[in-house]
Amino acid sequence: MAVASAAAGAGHAGAGPAGSGPGSPAPGGAGVLAVRALRFWLVNYRRTWRGSIYTSVANPVLYLGAMGLGLGTLVDQHGTGRLGGVSYLAFLAPGLLAATGMQTAMNESTFPVMAAVKWLKTYQAAVATPLRPGDLFRGHLLFTALRVLMNSAIFLAVMAAFGAVQSAWVIAALPVCVLTGLAFAAPVEAWAITRDKDTSFSLLIRFGLIPLFLFSGTFFPVTQLPGWIQPVAYATPLWHGVALCRSLSLGTADVGGSLLHVAYLVVLTVAGLLAGQHFYRRRLYV
Amino acid sequence: MPDSDVLIRAAGLTKRFGEFTAVDGIDFELRRGEAFGFLGPNGAGKSSTMRMIGCVSPPSSGTLTILGLDSVAQGQAIRGRLGVVPQEDTLDVDLTVRENLLVYGRYFGLPRAVIAERTTRLLEFVQLADRAGDQVDPLSGGMKRRLTIARSLINEPEILLLDEPTTGLDPQARHVVWDRLFRLKQQGVTLVLTTHYMDEAEQLCDRLVVMDGGRIAAGGSPRELIDQYATPEVLELRFQPSDHDQAVEKLADFPAERIEVLADRLLLYVADGDAALAAARRRGVEPLTSLVRRSTLEDVFLRLTGRRLED
């Protein structure tokens, strides 16, 4: 009767390997499996998306209003030669756009990883199915990329409404934001899966995220920094994201420079992908 | 026995964590349609064995073949045909009962319509049909366990793995879970379970192995194990603490097959408990209380390991 499903265990017996009948698990490659893992995050997000949209809209409005317009009026009065002759708002907005990509990526790749591996054990439940640790890792990264894309698109819309866009090329800043986000999310998720306490994340945010946010050329050109520290700023992934977004928004992008920035971010992402594959496996297959 | 009826075969199966050996070279075979148990105290290596069978823990050495496939090389294919009820609930507590089955079914790549149809049937089976739209978090422990069982059946598994399925449940909730598992067994599902409850093992298992310190101490049906390692009856004698040692002396050469001296009582393994009690009284032994009972797996475990199961 009722649990034909269960009884089918016996039914399978003579009928050859499971996976052949209708409704049996479909085979899938790594991409397909990562999308299955992504579904978990999407179903979960259905419950919280409204609140998150509010934040995604409010943040750019507040920042662009207070700093771009408010502070910007003061800055502009002193001449903007060092900003490349554009208004402070036009200078700042694409920097914040890239920083939004980083911020969103960091939010998705720290505490949610700990929740999935330790607090709720979502990962442990999923790894008992055909999904492998690497699939869970990539599924989570896909979700992170979607969230970055969403928040960046909202930011860009607000930015346009503030009149802070100077070139149609700015639309190419969206994939740049996603790439910047992944350059953070891939290595950070790979590291987060090895953590046992969430205090690690507070440290990362205090000593990693906030300095990057402030000193990667988001609010002022890196050339304003003391000479000895400038190479450090150039080495940070956020600076590459900021430089790309800014040149696209201002219409000053050149192919060679852009490719260098993209290559740097791609290298970080790939390194993170390899590390994550390894560390997810080590944590979930014990 | 035809080879196709052996669903799981382990030979020299070993799991080490650094210096610690959790599972120490065990061998067992599990046949289609049976309910097979690993009985043992906490730390005996049951859960480590279960995780290796679930293909989420590579063996340190030895071989493990499941459904004719190698547990390491073909783990993914095997997992697609297993159902797993882990020791700790791993439900998505923020989602609804139905969403939990949906997400899990999707992990197996099942189409939405198939999942919906099975969900209705499975929730009926675990008596949660009326909670389908409710969030999981406020459900009772017993309900969550039943939901976990329903979730584990979403892919119509050929083998269902249950790690301590009723640990932490109150007696009533345990009986509901046992009843559902018994029905699954009646329907021909192959069950593999670990437990440290001897009543659970006796009720559910056709065959079991007693594990202790990472090794298998003995194996067989509950009846066989009791026949082999215990006597038909047990006489339990309890004394005033001050009389305890004296009674032990008086019974030292008592003609029982075996006498276990526990901290609070004596266990006399005999064929006829009432006759033994009368004989003990004739020796001048006056217990505070006495009890004649049938032997259980607890006695088997005590005999095999010198310890009690639930200490």
Image (cartoon, coloured by chain):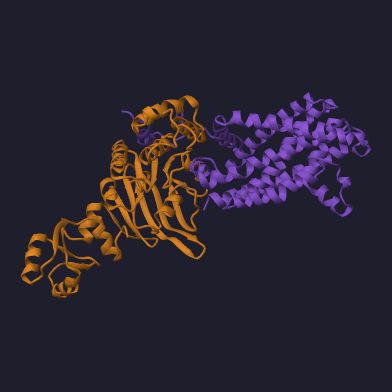
Closer to us: A204 or A175: A204
Query: A21 above or below A179?
Result: above
Q: Colour of chain B?
A: orange
Foreground of the two, A17 or A106:
A106
Q: In this picture, is A79 found above or below B39?
A: above
Observer-nearest of B133 and B213: B133
The image quadrant where one finds the C terminus of chain B is bottom left
Percent position of residue B218, x then y:
30, 59
Residue B177 image-quadrant placement: top left
Q: Does residue B74 appear in this view?
A: no
Residue A156 image position (x, y, % from top left) = 75, 28
The count of marks equals: 0
Could you tell me which residue is drawn at 11 percent across and 60 percent down? B273
Q: Looking at the picture, how far across and down is residue B106, in whole percent? A: 51, 32
Image check: A273 left or right of B273? right
Residue located 86% across and 42% down the image = A221
Residue B35 percent location from the top left of the image: 32, 45
Front one among B68 and A30? A30
Q: Colour of chain A?
A: purple
